[in-house]
Image (cartoon, rainbow, N blue to C red):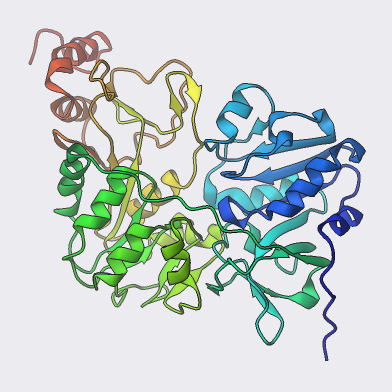
Amino acid sequence: MVAIPSASSPESVLAHVAPEADIIVPLANGEPRTLIDVLDQHAPQLTGVRVHQMHTLRDHPYLHGAYGDHLRHRSYFLSSVTRSAFAEGGCDLVPVNFSEMPLLLRRETRDPLVLAAASPPDPHGYVSLGTNADYTARFIGKAPFFIEVNPHMPRTFGENSLHLSQVVGWTEADYPLLEVPSPPMSAKDRHIAAFVADRVPDGATIQAGIGAIPNATLELLRDHRSLGLHTELISDGVMDLFEAGALTGTNKVTRPGKLVATFALGTRRLYDFLDDNSAVELLPVDWVNDPRVIGREHCFVSINATVEVDLLGQCNSEMIAGRYYSGSGGQTDFARGAMYSEGGMGFVVLHSTTSDESLSRIVARLCPGAPVTTMKNTVDHVVTEHGVAELRGRSIAQRVRALIGIAHPKFRDELERAACELGYLPRGRP
């Protein structure tokens, strides 16, 4: 019979944190709150410890550089918590495509320790990483795990489970998961979403990113049939689409019949939906987000929001008004996967202006210093409330005219003048 270690106090994790340690923590609700609190409380006694994590949702003093190099955070995607911390210099931001996170962590960490939240063990001693697989699941069996078992964490299926005999220690906690409701949707969001939904055929496999417009698109797909899901995030919108009967996955090439994702984030209703639901598979991100895997599906449709698009079709999805807001995430992974898919389509969605209509979000040039999240050669369709610009295979002049055509009317003349000055359009011609 396999020996299973007994639960211990959260403080017992400190025995496994060596000087100069690299600690890997799952994103969002995969973070073990009480274990991170212990690190915070004992940070002055630590030496050169780095915590690697995407999209942190719980605030901690160490995120803001409270302990200098004793305990420092390395973020791979900023959140509402870490945006200010990064701006203050309290944490580091590492640019990376989500699909490449496991590879990057293997190369850049030294004998990492994984700290993760987990579901209670089943009768056989297995726990699941619950709402997460992300980059963390790829380290099961390859790095030591210290886990925090929480009865509020759903038990999920896929490649995100491990046996208690595989962990170096575990503790128990009891606190509710953070809930992130679907964002409110405006009439403009629904208008943009309708342009996308009208182009999605029955039987397509879809991916929808974070934001009001992707979520509105999911809502408008409820009357579709035989859709498949292969996405990084399962949200309440995905659950609603499944319950409407639109998501069956019968036409999928990989994991037919399954809702495939790498993490989940939403309300308590979503977490209850995930619990012991064999229709859902949470799999490591280097498989889920691999463009080569995505491209195996027929008619794969990716739907992602961006901040601004320039007249060449380059997308900045990470910076707002000259300040870093998020990160690369998986947008490029899925845009490239859709490009490789037979009959695939990629949609980048955004409002044509800022909320007060003072600035165009279709721009001649990206804001100074802005990163190119998805490059022009990958972008397929750009959608605003004024229509759809089809870019793939188009010349520079054709792209420029298409993008000006979906800009807000009051900015179109200005954009055309800029396009002529940049040499994208001949001067003196409409």
Residue at the image point whose x is 65% and y is 53% from the top: 31
Residue at the image point whose x is 50% and y is 78% from the top: 276
Q: Is residue 78 left or right of residue 220?
A: right
The one of 192 and 345 positioned closer to us in this rendering: 192
Q: Position of residue 338 (x, y in %)?
A: 33, 54
Q: Is residue 112 above or below residue 329?
A: below
Q: Is residue 284 above or below residue 353?
A: below
Q: Is residue 115 above or below residue 283?
A: above
Residue at the image point whose x is 48% and y is 61% from the top: 288
Q: Quadrant of the C terminus?
A: top left
Q: How many marks?
A: 0
Q: Which quadrant holds residue 233?
A: bottom left
The one of 410 and 101 positioned closer to us in this rendering: 410
Q: Is residue 374 above or below residue 156?
A: above
Q: Which quadrant holds residue 381?
A: top left
Q: Position of residue 348 (x, y in %)?
A: 30, 41
Residue at the image point whose x is 41% and y is 33% from the top: 317
Q: Position of residue 65 (x, y in %)?
A: 74, 29
Q: Position of residue 163 (x, y in %)?
A: 72, 77
